[in-house]
Amino acid sequence: MTLKDLMDKTGMRLLTPDAPLQREVTTGYSCDLLSWVLAHGQAGMAWITVQTHLNVIAVAMLMDMACVIIPEGITLEEATLQKAEEEGVPVFASDKTAYELSGLMFALGVGQAERT
């Protein structure tokens, strides 16, 4: 499933309008502990987190993630959004909870990450 498909099917809003949306999402993940995400993140992952600081974009880039998803209507820090735009990291926002988004993504066929 492409990022565009995921956005359309979940009703998420794109916060980085110039980011490419044709990338395939290979798996999903929901976690807020950055060290844990660094240990278990994967390329192509759609990562759901309530964290809003600049390090979120750094982790997403380092792990070559497909996107970052900010749930529950949380506002992203301006510096974080600016860095995501500069680096072309797609960032989505949703009013749904991380739990709801995870279930919806799984139902849409976005698989679970392989355990490392």
Image: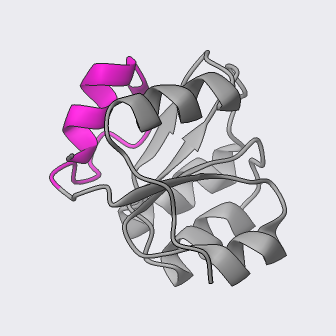
Q: Which residues are magenta?
A: 2-22
Q: Is residue 67 left or right of residue 19?
A: right
Question: In this view of the protein, which residue sits in the foreground, 24 or 57?
Answer: 24
Specify whether residue 102 is in view: yes
Residue at image position (42%, 58%) is 27
Q: Is residue 47 left or right of residue 17?
A: right
Q: Is residue 37 left or right of residue 106?
A: right
Residue at image position (64%, 54%) is 80
Is residue 68 highlighted in magenta? Answer: no
Image quadrant in which you'd find residue 108: top left
Question: Where the C terminus falls, by quadrant?
Answer: bottom right
Residue at image position (67%, 19%) is 73
> What percent of the width, then of the height, locates residue 84?
49, 58
Specify whether residue 14 is in view: no
Residue at image position (33%, 61%) is 26
Q: Is residue 42 above or below residue 17?
A: below
Image quadrant in which you'd find residue 36: bottom right
Q: Residue furthest left?
A: 22
Q: Is residue 109 above or below residue 23?
A: above
